[in-house]
Amino acid sequence: MSFTLVFTESYNRCAAKWLRKHPDLRLNYRKTLQLLELNPFHPSLRLHALQGRLQGMHSVSINLSYRITLDLQISDQEIILLNVGDRDSIYRDQQ
């Protein structure tokens, strides 16, 4: 079962900015997205639900320092990408 990644305009701006700052992580980022599309539950992604004001959202790891937050809609087999960045900034920036 594969999922569809949904790239919002807001996410695309955020990702473009992040990739300009971290061109060395472009390959890791691309691999994370590919694996997320094929199997969001793969152990290397470390998918986990967020709590508190971010309840309802999930996070996956690009590496030990950087994350992607997302909205995982299993019934529609869609993954809506929300934000990318270091752990502190993405959790702080989400509403």
Image (spheres, rainbow, N blue to C red):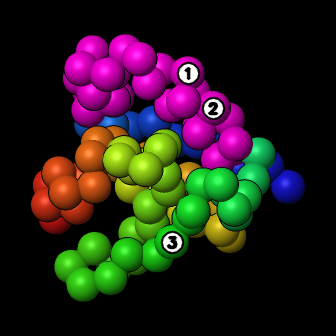
Q: Amino acid at mark 1?
A: Leu
Q: Is residue 28 visible?
A: yes
Categorize mark 2 by other alpha carbons within 10 Å: few (<14), some (14-19), many (20+): few
Q: Are marks 1 and 2 in contact (CB under 8 Å)?
A: yes
**Of 54 and 27, the residue lying toward us:** 27
Q: Amino acid at mark 3?
A: His
Q: Residue at x 22, y 61 (%)?
A: 91
In the picture as drawn, the residue positioned furthest to the right comes out as 1
Q: Position of residue 88 (x, y in %)?
A: 19, 57
Q: Which mark is residue 27?
A: 1
| Mark found first going from the N terminus, 3 or 1 | 1
Q: Is residue 92 above or below residue 28?
A: below
* Dot 3: element: strand
Q: Residue at x 27, y 15 (%)?
A: 20
Q: CA distance from mark 3 to mark 2?
A: 18 Å
Q: Are marks 3 and 2 in contact (CB under 8 Å)?
A: no
The answer to which quarter of the image holds residue 13 is top left
Q: Residue at x 39, y 55 (%)?
A: 69
Categorize mark 3 by other alpha carbons within 10 Å: few (<14), some (14-19), many (20+): few
Residue 76 lies left or right of residue 21; in this view the side is: right
- Residue extent of the magenta highlight: 12-37
Q: Which mark is residue 31?
A: 2
Q: Which mark is residue 65?
A: none
| Mark found first going from the N terminus, 3 or 2 | 2
* Dot 1: element: helix
Q: Is residue 56 above or below residue 81?
A: below
Q: Is residue 78 visible?
A: no
Prevailing secondary structure of the magenta residues: helix
Q: Residue at x 27, y 46 (%)?
A: 86
Categorize mark 1 by other alpha carbons within 10 Å: few (<14), some (14-19), many (20+): few
* Dot 2: element: helix
Residue 72 lies left or right of residue 38; in this view the side is: left
